[in-house]
Image (cartoon, helix red, strand yellow):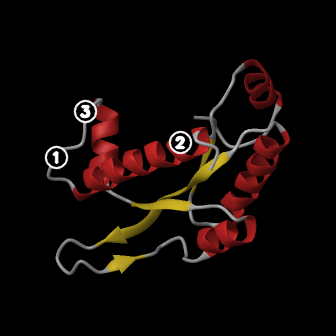
Amino acid sequence: DFPPGTGDIHLTILQKMSLSGAILVTTPQEVALLDVAKAHEMFLAMGVPILGVVENMSFFQESETSVKLFPFGRGHVERFCLEKGLKRLIELPLDAEISHCCDKGLALGVENSSRRLFDKLAQDIQQVLMEVKAGG
C-alpha cells in the first residue's frame, strides 16, 4: 500500500522487494488517474505485473431506494482500464460504516454489503495471482 506518487521511496521499495504483482487503487476523478498512470508506468518499468485496478469511493448507495449516486463522476476508471488493457477488479462504495470501522480498528460486520464486496475482491485477487504464477 503506497501513497500516491512515484518518488524515490517508491522506487527504493520496488528495488528491494520482490513483488508478485501490483493492484492500482484510485478514486473516480480524472485527476486521481494521473497519479495512477504514473504508478502504472513505474511498475511496468520495474517488471511488476499489474493485477488490476480497484475503484475506491466509486458510488454512494441510498439505503431507502438502492439508487446509486456517483458524486465523483463515472466512466473515467473504466476508460483508463480499457486504454491500458487492465482488469477493473471492483467498484467500492462510499460507505460510512467502512470509515467508522477503520477509525475504531473494527472489522466490517458480516451483514454489511461492503463486506461482501471486500470478500469478493480478496477472491478475485487470489485468482489473478494464481493466473500470474501459472504464467497466464
Which amino acid type is shown beneath numbered disc 2? Answer: Leu
Q: Judging from the image, what secondary structure is the residue with disc 2 in?
A: helix
**Alpha-carbon span between mark 1 and mark 2:** 25 Å
Which of the two residues, 25 or 136, is positioned nearer the viewer here?
136
Which of the two residues, 99 or 33, is positioned nearer the viewer here?
33
Residue at horizontal 79 percent and vertical 45 percent from the top = 44
| Residue at the spot of label 3 | 106
Image position of 116 with respect to 8: above or below: below
* First in residue order: circle 2 vs circle 3: 3
Residue at horizontal 75 percent and vertical 46 percent from the top = 39
Q: Judging from the image, what secondary structure is the residue with disc 3 in?
A: loop
Residue at horizontal 20 percent and vertical 53 percent from the top = 112
**Alpha-carbon span between mark 2 and mark 3:** 27 Å
Quadrant in the picture for residue 91: bottom left
Q: Judging from the image, what secondary structure is the residue with disc 1 in?
A: loop
Q: Which numbered mark, 1 or 2, is in the foreground of this view?
A: 2
Image position of 86 with respect to 14: above or below: below
| Residue at the spot of label 2 | 129
Image position of 7 with respect to 4: above or below: above
Which amino acid type is shown beneath numbered disc 3? Answer: Leu
Q: Which numbered mark, 2 or 3, is in the foreground of this view?
A: 2
Q: Position of residue 73 (x, y in %)?
A: 55, 76
Q: Which numbered mark, 3 or 1, is in the foreground of this view?
A: 1
Give the crowd class for mark 1: few <14, some 14-19, many >=20 residues within 10 Å: few
